[in-house]
Amino acid sequence: MTDSPAPVRPDRRAEIAAGLAGVRSRIADACAAAGRDPAEVTLIAVTKTYPAGDVVALAALGVTDVGENRDQEAAPKAAEVAAAGADPCWHFVGQLQRNKAKSVVRYADVVHSVDSVRLARALDAASVSGRDRPLDVLVQVSIDADAARGGALPDTADPDAGLAAVAEAVAGGDGLRLAGLMAVAPLGWEPDRAFARLAEVAEAFRAVHPGATALSAGMSGDLETAIRYGATHVRVGSALLGMRPTLR
């Protein structure tokens, strides 16, 4: 049996509440500037390295979506949060190895980082055997087409890493549902340049996959720009929860 996490101290709860209010205000202001409805943008609280108690506190404050990027941390944390009676939507947002697929499908509701046909097939097989409903998948797209940094490659027919091939593998999976795209602004790129390019890729992608409307982009430092270019999900950690603890 998994133990519930220790209760969050009142001062930490107040710190989290203040961070959440600030991020929600930024999202609302960005949506107003872009002429968008704030209800169109989902805040994903990225809780990697933060304790399960912080996730429970966020859930109590109305946060419904939580992101993690390492299975070895996320799997036990999800179990702790469930033991405390909280039930957020779990997003796996980090690079995923195929040998972790069976573990991730047990707790994740959405995987944002599928960037190869081989990974899509591994997740599909794990989902079919390990879940009672399809797993939502976002294909991670490489904005700068640098294969070394991860992400499916647009405008290429690569049979394993090409965006079209990866999307077709996800869409054709029995245990997967193609939900949209995810991207990270490349190092050295201005957010405007990065997310303008992503918007172009997303427009072409939706012409082929009209039901895949999710666009996960933007983090603590660039969420306003991502929203201006159509992000439907923003992944926020430090602006919400404070300086990140040292990785264990």
Image: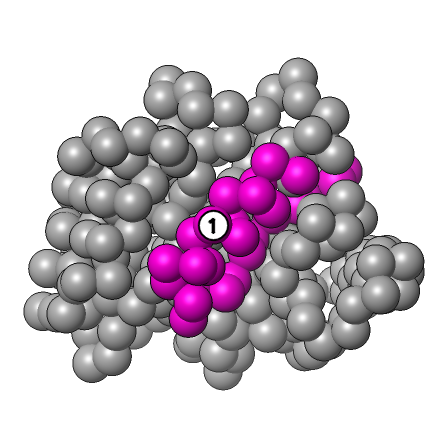
Residue 230 magenta-highlighted:
no
* Magenta segment: 196-222
Residue 117, horizontal then vertical, whole percent: 19, 43
> Residue 169: in sight, yes or no?
yes
Say above or below: 38 vs 216: below
Q: Nearer the viewer, residue 60 or 187?
A: 187
Say above or below: 153 vs 124: above
Residue 102, horizontal then vertical, whole percent: 17, 56
Q: Is residue 75 left or right of residue 124?
A: right
Residue 183, horizontal then vertical, whole percent: 52, 41
Q: Nearer the viewer, residue 245 or 137?
A: 137
Q: Amino acid at mark 1?
A: Ala
Q: Give the color scheme: rainbow, by chain, secondary structure or one colour.
A: one colour
> Residue 101: in sight, yes or no?
no
Q: Is residue 212 left or right of residue 47?
A: left
Mark 1 neighbour density, 10 Å: few (under 14) some (14–19) many (20 or more): few
Check disc 1 and report its element: helix, strand or loop. Answer: helix
Residue 190, horizontal then vertical, whole percent: 73, 25
Question: Which residue: 38% across, 49% down?
Answer: 139
Question: Which residue: 48% across, 78% down?
Answer: 87
Say above or below: 114 vs 214: above
Residue 220 magenta-highlighted:
yes
Question: Which residue: 33% across, 41% down?
Answer: 163
Q: Which residue is mark 1?
A: 204
* Quadrant in the picture for residue 194: top right
For the N terminus, the image quarter is: bottom left
